[in-house]
Image (cartoon, rainbow, N blue to C red):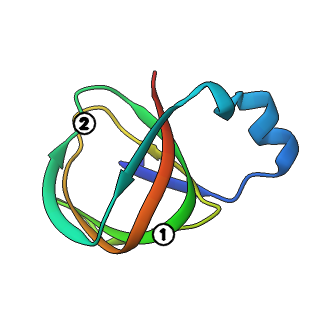
Amino acid sequence: MDAIKVTQPSEEELIELNISSWNPWECEESAFDWQYDQEEWCYLFDGKATIEPKTGEKVEIKKGDLVKFSKGLRCKWNVSDKVRKVYIFL
């Protein structure tokens, strides 16, 4: 099982997921540690970041990506371009 899964969804998939009802979040250029206590899905409207899991390879996420973060994931976020996203916990 991948701790981080990145896909590029179609407009139809985004409508089906109802991302307009998800929570908004923004972050300027920065670096911080994070832990996911629940599975999170997010969609990036803008920006770019590299996610460094405590175990595993770095994953770059960017505008247009739909990202699933697994419950229990411990990682470091390195935001290189201001991120504007929506997210939901499942």
Vertical position of residue 23 compared to residue 61: above or below: above
Residue 17: mark in rendering: none
Residue beneath the point at 59% across and 66% down:
63
Name the kind of residue labelled 2 in the image. Tyr
Disc 1 versus disc 2: nearer the observer = 1
Using the numbered discs, state the Cα–Cα distance from disc 1 to disc 2 in whole angstroms.
21 Å
Label 2 Cα neighbours within 10 Å, binned few <14 / some 14-19 / many ≥20: some
Residue beneath the point at 40% across and 69% down:
82
Most foreground residue, 90 or 64: 64
Residue 36: mark in rendering: 2
Residue 17 in the image: state x and y as whole percent. Answer: 71, 30
The residue identified by callout 1 is 47
Q: Secondary structure at mark 1?
A: strand
Most foreground residue, 44 or 1: 44
Vertical position of residue 30 compared to residue 87: above or below: below
Most foreground residue, 35 or 46: 46
Residue beneath the point at 17% across and 67% down:
31
Quadrant in the rendering for residue 25: top left
Label 1 Cα neighbours within 10 Å, binned few <14 / some 14-19 / many ≥20: many
Residue 35 in the image: state x and y as whole percent. Answer: 17, 41
Vertical position of residue 17 compared to residue 26: above or below: above
Residue beneath the point at 74% across and 52% down:
9
Query: Most extreme residue toward the right, as rendered?
Result: 12
Quadrant occupied by the N terminus: top left
